[in-house]
Image (spheres, rainbow, N blue to C red):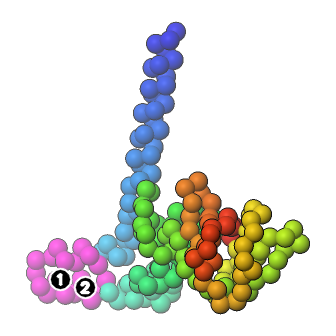
Amino acid sequence: MRNIVTFAAAQICILCASAATAAEKPEPRPAIFQKLIDCRGLSDSGQRLACFDAQVALLDEAEAKQEVVVVDKGQIKQAKKSLFGLSVGKLPFFGNKSGDDSSEEGDNYIDSKISGVRMSPSGKWIFTLEDGARWSQTEYDTIRQPKNGDAIRIKKTTLGGYMANINGGHGIRVKREN
């Protein structure tokens, strides 16, 4: 009986490992972009130029119809920063692979300024940052009264929470409200 249980447990581990490996495969490139890249493989320069011209025209048309969106690294960084603290799942176009320990702003921390502050009826601080993100204190912890313009750094904690440091002071636990 023990051998059957051990065998079943091993089978489950193998299935889970293969599912995890399948989930880590990178997203394929969009077909319209891949066809443009494939033009490089043509050896005849006339055919290659014709292929590039045709595929660039199709890509331009798709972008104009918003079927394809082109963003640069700066736009991605700004989007990551504005979504920091929200549960949005893994978005492949943000470039975060599982296990990514990036120290880039927007991945594991944000730096901002407080543009609004108030105390909730329960006696906890609620901060509005300059980008409109609203964060609230989750545990009772006495801190110096925050003011508009104070620097704030919010970073992810090991267990999935968030810790805020105002003007470099001691950290308080916070959560994103909007």
The foreground one among 20 and 53 is 20
Q: Pointers 2 and 1 in contact (CB under 8 A)?
A: yes
Residue 120 relative to residue 64: left or right: right
Range of residues picked out in magenta: 36-55
Inspect the image, locate mark 1, and give the three-letter code of the amino acid beneath it: Arg
The foreground one among 84 and 155 is 155
| Residue shown at the point (63%, 60%) measured from the top left | 161
| Residue shown at the point (49%, 25%) measured from the top left | 9
Measured in 3D between alpha carbons, the distance from the residue under mark 2 to the one under mark 1, in whole angstroms, is: 6 Å
Mark 1 residue crowding within 10 angstroms, few (<14) / some (14–19) / many (20+): some
The foreground one among 61 and 5 is 5
Inspect the image, locate mark 2, and give the three-letter code of the amino acid beneath it: Phe
**Residue 140 x, y percent position in the rendering:** 77, 63
Give the labeled residue for mark 1.
Answer: 48
Mark 2 residue crowding within 10 angstroms, few (<14) / some (14–19) / many (20+): some
Give the labeled residue for mark 2.
Answer: 52
Magenta segment: does it hold 136? no
**Residue 146 x, y percent position in the rendering:** 72, 82
Q: Secondary structure at mark 2?
A: helix
So how many labels did they put on this image?
2
Which corner quadrant of the image does residue 170 belong to?
Answer: bottom right
Which of the image's four quarters has the C terminus?
Answer: bottom right
**Residue 11 x, y percent position in the rendering:** 45, 27
One can see residue 93 in this view = no
